[in-house]
Image (tube, helix red, strand yellow):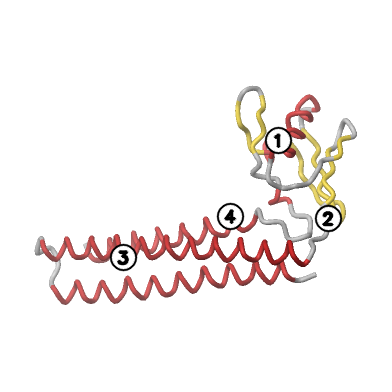
């Protein structure tokens, strides 16, 4: 029972770190990256479809994203989805390819993005602490039901705290790497 609680807590905390990584991959850093547009949903024949399923996304230059739809009739929907996204970049459409020119970031914009990264890291740390609270409650319930001993409870409590510390540190490292990427020119 104790090992099951620890395993589940570890999985939940890892999912929080993975979600943070996905969250941060969409933040613009001044360099072109396919991850900026891959997950944008496009209304295609009545279904919200991720961009990566509708088009070939490439980076022909460091500051340019090229989007070539598999179906040329979908170009207007893709362009509309890009305009409605929070990228803040106006697409250029030549009828076959959509080009997104990534502008370089100003110092003020870099600082704002770094603040966004910091707040998302803090949200992840809160999620991790919530998983700790859930695990401790589960351990407490198991002890009350006499399914584990008091020693097992304290051992599990220490292990859950160790997991919490490790994953909070990982979240900080992921956030710091993204902040360094944003602040580098």
- Label 3, label 2: how far apart the Cα atoms are: 46 Å
In the orientation shown, which residue stands out farthest toward the top?
Answer: 45
- Label 3, label 1: how far apart the Cα atoms are: 42 Å
> Where residue 114 is drawn, which disc sits there?
none
Residue drawn 69% across the image and 67% down it: 111
Contact, CB < 8 Å: mark 3 with mark 1?
Answer: no
Mark 2 or 4, nearer chain start? 4
The quarter in which the N terminus is drawn is bottom left
Q: Which residue is mark 1?
A: 81
Contact, CB < 8 Å: mark 4 with mark 3?
Answer: no
Mark 4 or 3, nearer chain start? 3
Q: Which residue is mark 4?
A: 23
Q: Nearer the viewer, residue 110 or 133?
A: 110
Mark 3 or 1, nearer chain start? 3
- Label 4, label 1: how far apart the Cα atoms are: 19 Å
Instruction: Give the image location of residue 89, x and y in percent.
Output: 78, 46
Instruction: Give the image location of residue 39, x and y in percent.
Output: 64, 44
- Label 4, label 3: how far apart the Cα atoms are: 26 Å
Answer above or below: position of 122 versus 83: below
Residue drawn 53% across the image and 64% down it: 121
How many residues crowd around disc 2 within 10 Å: few (fewer than 14), some, or many (20 or more)? some
Instruction: Give the image location of residue 78, x and y in percent.
Output: 74, 34
Residue drawn 74% across the image and 54% down it: 33
Contact, CB < 8 Å: mark 4 with mark 1?
Answer: no
- Classify residue 147 as left or right of residue 102: left
Mark 4 or 1, nearer chain start? 4
Q: Which residue is mark 3?
A: 6
Tell me where residue 144 sits by quadrant: bottom left
Q: Nearer the viewer, residue 174 or 116?
A: 116
> Where residue 103 is drawn, which disc sits there?
2
Secondary structure at badge 2 equals: loop
Mark 1 or 2, nearer chain start? 1
């Amino acid at each position: 029972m104790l090992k099951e609680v620890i395993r589940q807590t570890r999985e939940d905390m890892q999912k929080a770190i993975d979600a943070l990584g996905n969250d941060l991959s969409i933040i613009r850093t001044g360099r072109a990256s396919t991850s900026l547009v891959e997950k944008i949903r496009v209304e295609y024949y009545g279904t919200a479809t991720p961009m990566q399923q509708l088009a070939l996304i490439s980076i022909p230059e460091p500051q340019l994203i090229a989007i070539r739809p598999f179906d040329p009739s979908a170009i207007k929907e893709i362009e509309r989805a890009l305009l409605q996204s929070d990228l803040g970049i106006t697409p250029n459409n030549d009828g076959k390819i959509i080009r997104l020119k990534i502008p370089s970031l100003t110092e003020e914009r870099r600082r704002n993005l770094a603040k966004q990264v910091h707040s998302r890291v803090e949200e992840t740390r809160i999620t991790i602490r919530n998983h700790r609270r859930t695990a401790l409650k589960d351990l407490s319930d198991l002890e009350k039901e006499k399914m584990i001993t008091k020693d097992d409870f304290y051992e599990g409590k220490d292990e859950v705290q160790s997991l919490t510390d490790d994953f909070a540190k990982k979240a900080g490292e992921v956030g710091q790497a993204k902040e360094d990427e944003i602040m580098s020119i």
